[in-house]
Image (cartoon, helix red, strand yellow):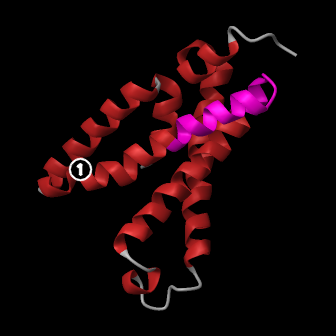
Amino acid sequence: MLGVTTVTLLTGLTPAFLITLLAQTVTSLLVGDVSGIAPSWVVSSLVPVLVTECWRRLVLRCLPADPFVFIFGSAFFGAAIAAASAHLLAMMLLGSPTEIWPGAGPAWPGFILLIAFPEAFINGTLITLLIVYCPDAVRGYASAYESRPRL
């Protein structure tokens, strides 16, 4: 799941689906577990890509057109929401946290934060570097801000 937000913001919705499906297929073939391609792709790729794109559109619609708003709203916070939603879906599909980890009942919100923060940091840092040095390469940024007037 690492970098799915960056791939989505770089390439767009449909290419992100295909890239993550290819990555999941190669990973599953290398591990030798072909039966897990579809559920793993849904949880670790499909959900974060959809959440990232929906969150990007919400940020563009509700907040002013500014590079900092895009970086912090779509990249940093969007990656955290995408990671948290994917792990919450995985926990819902697998059952309660106490079935997976004995004694993890009250600790699962902290676990979600421990996963969401590094995901947000890594994706946000990559998108920040790309926005600073080559903003035209980030399709989610270029398509959203080239037609909108600057404040």
Q: Nearer the viewer, residue 93 or 75?
A: 93
Residue 48 vertical placement versus 105 (above, below) = above
Where residue 51 appears, x then y in whole percent?
A: 53, 44
Q: Which residue is mark 1?
A: 38
Q: Amino acid at mark 1?
A: Ala
Residue at 54% x, 16% y is 137
Residue 134 vertical placement versus 26 (above, below) = above
Where residue 58 appears, x then y in whole percent?
A: 67, 35
Residue 52 vertical placement versus 131 (above, below) = below
Mark yes or no: residue 74 visible.
Answer: yes
Residue at 38% x, 45% y is 45
For residue 52, which quarter of the picture? top right
Q: Quadrant of the C terminus?
A: top right
Residue at 43% x, 69% y is 92
Does residue 16 belong to the magenta stretch? no
Classify mark 1: helix, strand or loop: helix
Q: Nearer the viewer, residue 39 or 117?
A: 39
Residue at 53% x, 29% y is 9
Residue 81 vertical placement versus 18 (above, below) = below
The magenta stretch is 51-70
- Which SS does the magenta portion mostly show? helix
Where residue 41 appears, x then y in whole percent?
A: 31, 48
